[in-house]
Structures are given as structure tokens and as C-alpha cells.
Amino acid sequence: MSKRAGNKKRRGTRFVMLEDWFLRTEAWRSLSPVARAAYVEFADRFNGSNNGHLAMAVRSLADAINVGKSTAERALAELLERGFIEVTQASSFNVKTRLATEYRLTAHFCNRTNQPASKRFREWTAQKKTQSRLRDRTVPSQGPSPENPTKIPAHSPVSGTETRRFGT
């Protein structure tokens, strides 16, 4: 048997692991397909020791998941709102530097702040949508009301008069 020489690490193929409990959370199931693709892109950039230093600009995310900038921005907002990612350093733009926003995955230990995984997405719940009752409508239903029937004019085709047909 051969032994590995020195401190060389064994390199296998990289993969993104999404565990079963993670996929069953209400927050994950409520994500749009674009937001799910954005999360997979974040997870792909995570190498086990750079959580909290995951730099991602909206344009680079849009290019990576093949969507427009506005769609990528909505996906980022969705991931932030549901607690899958958190901002660790806001972006800045000036003459000397252009820094993209840096994020951390809340499902993993943060290497930047040395905080344990917060898993905020597990606490997220969908807001209940309130539906109006039928009688609470502000616009009346179509058709004449029983107490004020609509009168049909005498010259209307509905009143029984015949219309001329050309060519017969």
C-alpha cells in the first residue's frame, strides 16, 4: 500500500451536499427555482474554510445561474429574507477599490466571525394570506340587481326586432 507523502491532502471531486432535513424545511420548499440555483452557487463556492468570505456580486451571480441582473437580485433578497445567507461585509465602490458583498451560509460554521451555524432558515414560516369573504367585495357582481332591473331599449336586437341581413 502506498502512503501519502507529507502533508498532501487527498483531492477528490468537489460536490455540493444538500441534506434531507435541509430540503424538508418550509423555507427551502418556498424558495423559487432561481433562488435555489443561487443557493447552490453559494454552496459551490464554499470550500469548508471560507464561510463568511463568500464574495458575490449580483452580476456575477446572474452570469453563473444564467438569469438577468434583476432576477438574480430578487433571488439574493429571497435567500436573505428566509435566512439561508447573511451579509458579513457590505459592498463598497470607490476610486481605489470595488468590493462585492461578502456572505456566509447560515447552515455552516462561520470562519470570519467564529460563530456556530445559526440555521435561521429553520425558524422562517410563511405568512398566512388573508382572503376576503364573498360578501366583503367592494365591486358588485355583474348583472342587474333584483330591485333595479335594467330596461332593454325598444330598438335593441334583444327586444325582439329583426335585423336586416345583407345578401339573403
Image: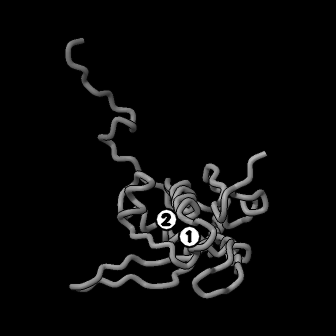
Q: Do the residues labelled 2 and 1 touch (CB within 8 Å)?
A: yes
**Which quarter of the rendered picture does the N terminus lie within?**
top right
**Which quarter of the rendered picture does the C terminus lie within?**
top left
Q: Name the residue under label 1.
A: 79
Visual colour scheme? one colour
Secondary structure beneath label 1? helix
Q: In which quarter of the image is residue 63?
A: bottom left
Q: What's the amino acid at mark 1?
A: Leu
Q: In this view, does 112 lie to the left or right of 152?
A: right
Residue 145 appears in the rendering = no
Q: In this view, does 113 lie to the left or right of 66?
A: right
Say which mark, if any, is on residue 60: none
Q: Quadrant of residue 157?
A: top left
Q: What's the amino acid at mark 2?
A: Ala
Instruction: Please state which of residues 4 and 42 is positioned toward the viewer in this rendering.
Output: 4
Residue drawn at the location 63% of the way across and 56% of the way down: 16
Secondary structure beneath label 2? helix
Residue drawn at the location 74% of the way across and 48% of the way down: 2
Q: Name the residue under label 2.
A: 75
- Which x, y percent locates residue 86? 56, 79
- Which x, y percent locates residue 70? 37, 64
Circle 1: is it few (<14), some (14-19), or many (20+) Cα within 10 Å?
A: many
Circle 2: is it few (<14), some (14-19), or many (20+) Cα within 10 Å?
A: many
- Which x, y percent locates residue 102? 47, 78
